[in-house]
Structures are given as structure tokens and as C-alpha cells.
Amino acid sequence: MPLATAACAVLLAGCGAQVEETSRAATDTATVPRCGEEVEYTTPERAVAYEAGSADKLFALGLVDHVHGYVMPPANPPVEESPWAKDYASVEFLSDDLLNRELVVDAEADLVVAGWNSGFSDQRGITPEILDGLGIQSFMHSESCYNYPGHPERVPPFEGLYTDLERLGAIFGVPERAEELVEGYRARVDAVVERAGEEEPVPVFLYDSGTDQPFTAGNQVPPHDIITHAGGENIFGDLEERWTQVGWEAVVEAEPEVIIILDYGDLPAEDKIDFLTSSPTMAEVPAVVEENFFVLDYNEGISGPRNLDGLEKFADHLREHREDQG
């Protein structure tokens, strides 16, 4: 775990338990890691969230009164489908474009919540360092920190979710609320793992997109934990990557029995399934022969509370698959 604080790997409650909080009644500040860098935060009142994973974390913590608005690119499913639809409706929809500095400044944001290279970007000129210079606070999803320049931090994806909730709870002064939420999420995961038992893992391939080469999930994103906790084996789980390209030959050689289709934007799941079932290269792959596809909603696949929904549904799918196999 390069450059991450050693306690992150061993504390039951995750890295967020390391938070050093001052007397908030007097100062309204808390020192919390931002990836691998200790940062002092002042309680935000006009937070801007990029994508549903960020907004969902804030809303799950009951922080809607501290959220000014959200940025939601077209790839995201409609916010009306969210468990927090009422919270989305009560804050401002700022843009359906990618996150950018001008938008954040115009919104008079005092905190921006996003992922590294999935919101914050050197190429687009919006980084935590740049925002620091503008006096705007920033928070990055822990699961996106494994290759953050200068201050990397590596935690398993689900632990990253728990860590984010605990850190946000400290920043906003609601640590008890975060602790209760994380405890409930851990219990849901434990229940899935217990029910999956000790059976031989089912080989699973996640298909995001791509025709010449498939785009898939390495071991640094939530779908990897969804697969493994549900009783599957991510056929590309040895790749120390988030989302990455691989070769079709490697997919065929791994003989996945189940294919997860990530469903989003202008690449609907039905079109991806049609491509896979009509591909001569994939014709003999067990999951294609059996048409064993599982559709994972975009917001169940990026870091956020809906990961737990995706896990439980996929675990049900794997159980049905095992039953069908006899």
C-alpha cells in the first residue's frame, strides 16, 4: 500500500477513523486526509458534487443543506431514479458537462467532491492544487487515489467508500452519522459474503465498452469488490488498474461464465449484449453461449452508496447461476 498511512490497513473502521478533529463548536475545522495528504477543512456550506457517486455520499450523510449543486454528465442515469431524488431536486443542477474551474468559481463553491481523473484533471485544469490556490476546498474519492501524483493512497474499493463517508462525516461535523451508516453498509456486505459461502468462485468478465479492445474493470474499482464479495472471480482482478483496456483473446482464454454489462449514457446495455452475442471471437465463451449477462447500473459501479445495491443484486444473480448449473 504505497505511501498510505499504515493504520489504514488495520483499523476496523477504515482510514477515516484516523481523522484528527478539533473542537468544532469553537473552530468548525477538521484535519482529514485528502488521498495521502493531511488537509485542514472548514465546514462547507456550498459544496459542489461531480457525478452521482459524490452527491449520493453527501445525501446519504444527510448533508443536503450543505450542498449548493451538482454536475451530472450525460453518462449518468437520471437523478430521478436515485434513492435521494428529493435531495437532488432541492439543490441546483449546475451542468451536464465535465467538471471545470469556471463552473466551480461561478457557483461560489467552498468544497468540490469528485474523483481523481474522474472529475479532477490536469488536462482540463481543475485539480485540488489549483483549487487550493483559489481558496476552494476539495475532496477526492479514496478509491481514485491509488495513483494520485505526490500523495497516492491505496485502499480496496469498498473500504474506500467507508473511508469517504467517515472523512466527509468529520469534515461536516457528523461523525456519528457516518459511523452508523458505515456500520450498516458493512453488515450488508458481510451478509452477502456469508451467504456466498466457500464455493469455487465463478469467473466473471465486466464489459464496459469497446469493440477493437474491451474496456473493463481492474482491481481498483467497485465492480471488482462486487464480483469477489458476491462469490465471483474478476478475470482481470490481477490488474492494478481502475478502468483499463485488455485484449479479446484474454477474455476468451479466461472462459467467463457470467458477463457484467455496465449500463450508462448513449451505450445502453442492450446494444452491448447484441455486440457480444454477434461477435465471432466471443461465440464459444460460456457466458455468451448461455446468454448469461447481468446489467449493472452506472451508479452501482462507481464509488458510492449504491455499490451495496449492485452487490446484493449481483449476488442473487450468481446464486441463480449456481443453481442452474446444478
Image (cartoon, grey):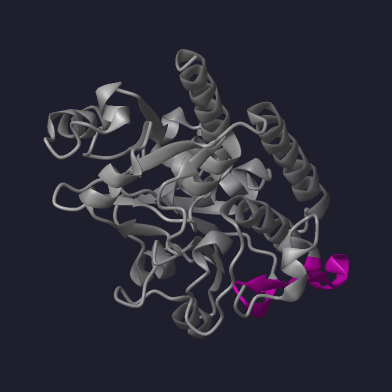
Residue drawn at (52%, 50%) of the image: 303
Q: Position of residue 165 (x, y in %)?
A: 67, 53
Residue drawn at (26%, 43%) of the image: 252
Q: Position of residue 186 (x, y in %)?
A: 72, 41
Q: Is residue 317 above or below residue 306?
A: above
The magenta-colored residue range is: 18-41
Residue drawn at (58%, 68%) of the image: 154
Quadrant where the image shows the N terminus = bottom right
Question: Foreground: 130 or 259?
Answer: 259
Q: Position of residue 259 (x, y in %)?
A: 35, 34
Left or right: 90 in relation to 285? right
- Answer whether residue 86 is visible to the viewer in this image: no
Question: Foreground: 114 or 23?
Answer: 114
Q: Position of residue 240 (x, y in %)?
A: 46, 64
- Quadrant of the image occupied by residue 9: bottom right
Residue drawn at (48%, 51%) of the image: 69
Left or right: 119 in relation to 215? right
